[in-house]
Image (spheres, rainbow, N blue to C red):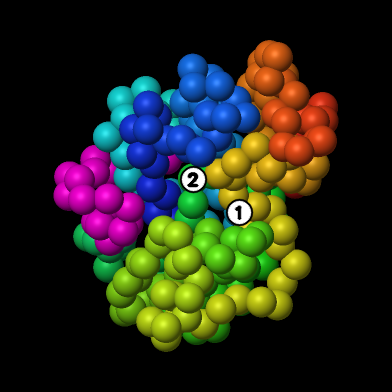
Amino acid sequence: MGWSLVVPLKPLVRAKSRLSRATGEEFRPRLALAFALDTVTAALACEDVRDVAVVTDDQLAAERLAAVGARIVPDTPGRGLNAALAHGARAVRARRPGAPVAALNADLPALRPAELELVLHSASLFPRAFLADAADIGTTLLTATSGRELEPAFGGASRARHLASGAREITGPQAPSVRRDVDTGEDLLAALALGVGPHTALQAPRLGPVAAVQEGSKRLPPPQVRASGA
């Protein structure tokens, strides 16, 4: 039937707050939107993905993400990340009762459709499964096959919580782009090195004097643009 993905997105004025040190406070919301646009565009290009529902109350983000093909679900619970994900999963299954559902972070600007396909294929073998982030602390993807509840436990050390909940950890496929979420300047450097989507690549050179996203002695390299659909 194809996966339905649920992508949560905070209001842009509050999104990616830990990036402020690297990007500057004014630029941070624009970069958060670029991340989400690249994430959703890449997800929709994945052959195993049927649709993407973005749970957000941000009007600008809703308009831009709808334009690239996402379905917008208002965050009516308004009780944080996990409540938004559970609400999005219910909205998906109200339309497609037997849909396998996956929660995907909105901050994966280097996401590659082929790598996401590998991860979703592995996830389909288990009732619930998840993929840890690059730091092996958090989670970037949580899945539930038909008939199973998503039971999201995102935030902070969510890898341990998802393991404790009985979800199977996906460790097989080499999928660095699906694990590379961006919370800090260091994360942004790593994503740019992998190759980001066009929306993030367009914004990266505008980082100005901090364009140097300093993290220790490292500086922001010219962005490598991920080829469309790659």
Q: Quadrant of residue 219?
A: top right
- Say above or below: 218 vs 26: below
Q: Which mark is residue 46?
A: 1
Determine whether, in the image, residue 158 is placed left or right of residue 135. Answer: left
In the rendered image of this protein, does residue 140 appear above or below residue 128? above
Of mark 2 and mark 1, the one earlier in the sequence is 1
Depth check: 170 or 113 in front? Answer: 170
Magenta-highlighted residues:
69-88
Q: Nearer the viewer, residue 42 or 84?
A: 84
- Residue at point 36%, 39% (across, down): 10
Q: Residue at x 60, y 41 (%)?
A: 184
**What x and y, as percent, mark residue 24?**
55, 22
Mark 2 closeness class: few <14, some 14–19, many ≥20 residues within 10 Å: many
Question: Which residue appears farthest toward the left when viewing the image?
Answer: 77
Callout 1: few (<14), some (14-19), or many (20+) C-alpha neighbours within 10 Å? Answer: many
Label 2 close to label 1 by CB (< 8 Å): no
Q: Position of residue 178 (x, y in %)?
A: 63, 57
Quarter location, residue 225: top right
Circle nearer the viewer, 2 or 1: 2
- Residue 191 pos. (x, y %): 71, 43
For label 1, the SS is: loop
| Residue 74 visible (yes or no) | yes
Residue 37 visible in the snapshot: no
Q: Is residue 199 left or right of residue 215?
A: left
Tag 1: amino acid: Cys
Q: Which residue is mark 2?
A: 106
**Number of marks in the rendered image:** 2
